[in-house]
Amino acid sequence: MKKIYLANPRGFCAGVKYAISYVDTVHDSYQNETIYVRKEIVHNRRVVEDMQKRGISFVNELEEVPENSIVIFSAHGVSPEVVEQAKKKNLRIGDATCPLVTRVHRKAKKYKDTYQIIYIGHEGHDEAIGTMGEAKMFLVEDEEDVVKLKNVLDESNPITYLMQTTLSVKDTKSIVDKIAEVFPTVEHPDKDDICYATTERQEAVESIIDHIDAMLVIGADNSSNSLRLEQLAKKTKPKSFRVANASEISRESFDDREIEILGITAGASSPQILLDEIILKLKEFYPDVNVELFPESREDSMNFKLPRELLK
Ligand code: SF4
């Protein structure tokens, strides 16, 4: 391998930084108490393990949290049912939901009494579960699912749609086109819900893809936006692949692929340390490899402030 191009923006998005800093700030402010986080704060094991080392506890469900404790909801958001359950246990709630996910929840609440809502998303993903808890929704994962709704929705009443924030921009457009074809009366929202970070990271991959032999995506198996980056890269460069961390790469995996120029990107929940460790390993394999930022890069464009009142 001769060259590595780093895509930008890549890695932590504003929502992930917000969620991590939320937990850190609550942890610093309530040093004598155990802080419980429901689900992985973001979909990355390294981030979770670093927090666990500092004494922060992770649970899957609120049953595992003692009454009156502090619980923080993860970046992906929760359904109103979970909030109710927390209140019943007198938990003090910190909400680290990304503000861009919260925006979709607000739209769901606004639409729920007027519209039949189609939700474009991935079944079982934490964000989809949380958002779909706000109202009755009809989940579609692809165009075929849209066709199956033909005899389920009542076309004499209003229909609209919402979507998960981390979808593939192109695939979602095809699904929206299918919705418009199957349900010509559908009311399109003013703006779609795919977030800026997902869009910018996918655009960065598209701008680099013709200049490389393969893309290495750093991201976990349960990270929706990382899976979309991998899928996008593979469409043009089939040798592209995804790893969760440096332990998953070997010299053979690169030699076998015959890569001269490698692109690297990272999903929105992958910390910089994972990239640093991978670069270190690649430099051991190929001491003369040249690592540079891809020339058409740009910086992540957003930042969210923590609320004044951290707990409710
Ligand atoms: S990927 Fe988008 S929606 Fe998800 S946390 Fe980041 S900014 Fe928020």
Image (cartoon, rainbow, N blue to C red):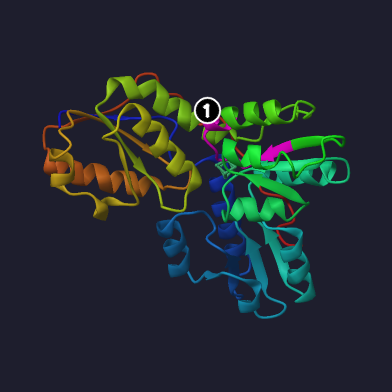
Assign the C terminus to one quadrant of the image: bottom right
The reply to whether the magenta stretch includes residue 170 is yes
In the image, residue 107 lies at what x, y percent? 78, 41
View extreme (bottom): residue: 66
The residue at the point 71 percent across, 58 percent down is: 79
Q: Quadrant of residue 46?
A: bottom left
Crowd rating for badge 1 (residues with CA inside 10 Å; few <14, some 14–19, many 20+): few
Viewer-proximal residue among 14 and 178? 178
Ligand 1 sits in quadrant:
top right
The residue segment tinted magenta is: 161-172
Above or below, 235 against 92 in this view is: above
Judging by the rendered image, the residue that carries numbered circle 1 is 170
Q: Pick whichever, 7 or 175, lies toward us.
A: 175
Q: Could you tell me residue 97's position as x and y percent?
A: 65, 51
Report x, y in % for residue 153: 78, 42
- Residue 305 shows in the view: no
**Does ligand 1 reach within 8 Å of label 1's beta carbon?**
no
Instruction: Check if residue 88 falls in the magenta segment.
Output: no
Residue 17, image x, y percentages: 54, 46
Amino acid beneath label 1: Lys
Residue at the image position 60 percent from the left and 57 percent from the top: 74
Q: In which image quadrant can residue 117 be found?
A: top right
Furthest toward the front, the residue is 151
Q: Please state which of residues 248 and 278 is positioned toward the viewer in this rendering.
A: 248
For the point 12% across and 43% down, which residue is it? 285
Residue under the point 40% across and 47% down:
219
- Confirm whether residue 238 shows in the render: yes
Q: How many marks?
A: 1
